[in-house]
Image: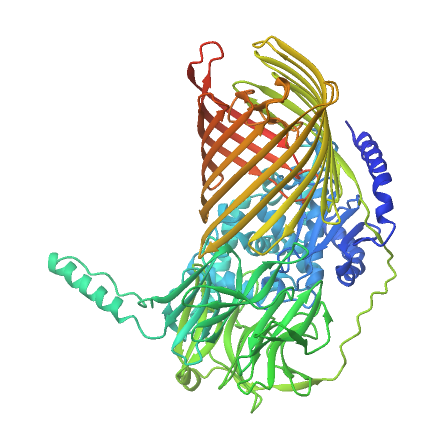
Amino acid sequence: MNKITLALLATLGSTVVSSFFSPLVQAEDSLQTIETEHARIHFHKDYQAFAQQVASKFEPIYADVSARVGFEQNDKLDFLIGDDFHQANGYAIPLTAGKIVKVFSSSPRSEEALGAYNDWLDLVISHELTHKIHMSQPSRSWRSMLDSSVLDSDILNFSRYPRWVTEGYATVIETEYTQQGRVNSDYIKAMLQQWATEGQLPSYDALNGNSSYEGNRMAYYQGSAFLFWLQANYGQEKLQQLWKRSTAKKYRDFDDAFTGLFLDSPRTLYKKFVVEQTVSAKQTQLITDNTGSVWQNNSFKVISSEPSPQQDKLLQLEVDDKGYTTLSIFSFAENNKAKDKFIEDNEKLLEADKEDVANSTPEVFNREAEIVIKSAKKSQWRQARWLDDNHALVLQSQLQDNQELGFELVKVELTTGKVEKITQSLRLHDFTLTPDKKSVIATSHFAGFNQLIKISLGDGSYQSLDSKRLNQPMDNLTLSPDGETLALMAIHEKHWQIHFYQLATQKWQVVNLPLTGNYTSHLRWQTEGVYFSQSHNNITQEVSRGVKDNVAVDVYRLQPETKSWQQLTQGEKLATNAFTINDQLIYLSTTSQGQDTYSQDLNKSITEQKLPSGNYELLTLDKPVPEISLASDLSTKNYGIGPQTGIITLTTGYISNEDNGLDLVIRGGDPLGRLRWQAAVTHGDQQDHGAISIKSNWQNIEWFAEFIDSKYENDSLKRKNQLFNIDLAKTFIISDSSQLKVQLGVGTDDIEYFSDSLLTQADDEINHYRVQGQYAFQHNIGRINYGFSFNAALIDYESSKQEKHTWQRNDVGLGAFISIEDYALKYSYQDSEVDDDTPFYALLTQGGQLATTTSQVLTSHKVDPRVPLAWQTGFHFKQHNVEVDVNDFTLFYLQHEADENDTLAAYGVELKISMTGNMTPLLDGLTLLAGFSWYEEQNTFTDLIEDQSQFYLSGTYQFK
């Protein structure tokens, strides 16, 4: 089936559906679209100002990136605007029907990789556009002639190149377009330099990413640095030539295309590049002396670190290598107990063997945490500050009213870990505590707007301190000791710079430092001054063309009374998050193993090291904040059912000992998931089906309809059904921990049934009405998650061919789980019963392989691939199910009883991967399942229970 046929199907489906939905969208739609020559930009109306900024930038960036890549893709891109995780980012989706890119509206922080640029939107848009344009270039080889016509996606193009190439090249283009970008980031250059001095630059095999510290980002950082080096040494045009060789009529894999052009393999040239990086970094290391020493070996990454008001304890927020956050409190006192234990163990070692060699003394004996509070979810906490001796204030990720995540202020009781919410729907970016400890000053960020606000810790109410600013980020808030002046990071003249804001007069001032580095961040105001981190050049002769200049990130201090500045640290490591305790400078030092805490004598470093110092200017900003206008030359229109695209795939089906089948699926929808549809046919050994289904999410109500023409047949029964079902569902968020889902449905089933074993047959039409509900609760204690759920259903049936014969079905069930990290223990019980008036052809049945055409609403036939078709039949089912999840694998034990018959059991192992949500029409509802089960089966004639086994493998699209 070609694109023209798919387009006709999509148009036909859209026409039919739009005739139903069009009356609903005559009024202003909450979803809107701005269309440009090469893009459709879709957004919720709250994001209109931000979307207009994206739209105004899009075409110039598109033209520039297309010229740099050397290819122009003509299909319109669908640009989605949102803020899913309250962080700056974007992504291009390779598995799509249509070309989808998403950009988040949260601005980056000054310390982040995306933050070192005056207009981060230019960077994100150019990066993601590079992916879409680069990956849309079709291959001229006959092997790839079906790539676009069958899948209408660029997934095969993404697999054409290693990840370090796709991400590295997009990073190169973002740098060339913005003249800033991550290739020119001082922080990233200093980081790669540090890795080089340690001999820890990633190997070629690790360049695509691994689990080491910053390892997954090396495809961006080191990948782009390598491509930049190739351009500098072999010619600017070489990368465009490489893409042309990779898409030529003569089929080549990436290594062949690369080697024929550069006359060496990418692996060999990468090794040469690493050598030159290392030589350059070592040259810098030889001319600088490290001023600090290790104070604490931390576990992985430190988000925030702050001394207590009494300066005797440290409050630290850390992230481990699995992404989980821990809030810890350490004493500043040395760990003499660990030191004495080490000495004692060495003495015992030498007493036992005088010729042995004792263990070397470590650089530091780690301080033991007095209190450890673990979050249950990854990336749940962002920033922590002391409130008092017993409480800390933390930014915690919470679900917002629009189902996006945003950070809110909470109070954590340090002795118990109890969390008390303070704010709701403010989406905070940063905060600092006022001296009276009754309020905080924070930056709120939503839909591209930033604003300074003051929040009461008593009731969470707030007042504005300044006007809203569109796409003008602010962070690293810190108050002067007297509470009268706020210092923060903000953009001024295309660079992050330190700003002062006088709270009483609302006067803005900017610190004009005579320093040239492009990285400034990590502010902290203490009595002695404002501490911050700043990048600067280490002046050395360039040892290799294409290896970026050597830079360092060190700790500095401002003294506002004298308008002076002083560099405080020096060395090969990246120094950030500094503060002082009793004339000791404490700061974080970043290495390839993570972030450790260092210390140095502050007075000694100033008097003996002769580090740079000077004065700065304080510039007054008297220009008012520009008014935000929603007027635009680009028209906005209702989104409606969105642009509908369709695709065809032959990739789904199922295999088992009992039944094998193949699904042919045509499906499609819009980028935001307002309307999705699919038509499918299944042909198998025991089942043949055709199905049409459609779903929509409108006014926060889930709408679903399906029509299925099905046929089941095995040794014991033949069954034909024509099903039509409609289902409406609404989810009510009761709290952060609980929700209630209510479903209403109607349907009809035209059935023909014949049983070989019972020598009975029937022909009937059954109408039904469904009411279902499910309550779910989930909570955590530290990193342990637990929860429970209840479900119930009531279905009224009516036979139209059996003198209005009626009967009922009642379902009740419960479930519970407990999990820690990637391990979970689950239990569920389900009781399903139809009354005695139920005809034999409408009895409950269990088992059979799941197909794309299987009904997605509650029916009398419960499909379960773990057991064969019609494994059990009866009026009353009781089922116990126990599962143990280990990563993506599930060990299961099933106990099932039908009526008063013997209980049968099944057990085995499954691997299940599901795509949830509405990311793309192609992925929506895709489930891959593989398993092996052992099950008991009752012989129909002898009633003996026999042991059987089966394997099963399936790929299905079920998107309800």
Q: Residue furthest bottom?
A: 562
Against 683, residue 740 (above or below) is: below
Q: Is residue 572 visible?
A: no
Quadrant containing the C terminus in the rendered view: top right
Against 535, residue 666 (above or below) is: above
- In the rendering, at what x and y percent does residue 926 appear? 63, 36
Q: Is residue 675 visible?
A: yes
- In the rendered picture of this protein, how many numbered marks are placed on residues? 0
How are the residues colored? Answer: rainbow
- Residue 753: which quarter of the image? top right
Quadrant containing the N terminus in the rendered view: top right
**For this view, does 702 lie left or right of residue 833?**
right
- Residues 34 and 394: in front is 394
- Residue 179: which quarter of the image? bottom right
- Residues 49 and 241: in front is 49
- Residues 425 and 32: in front is 425
- In the rendering, at what x and y percent does residue 616 appear? 60, 86
- In the rendering, at what x and y percent does residue 242 appear? 66, 44
**For this view, does 917 lie left or right of residue 283?**
right
- In the rendering, at what x and y percent does residue 956 appear? 62, 31
**For this view, does 524 lie left or right of residue 762?**
left
- Residues 765 and 932: in front is 765
Which residue is pictured at 71% across the width and 26% down the height? 798
Which residue is pictured at 47% across the width and 44% down the height? 817
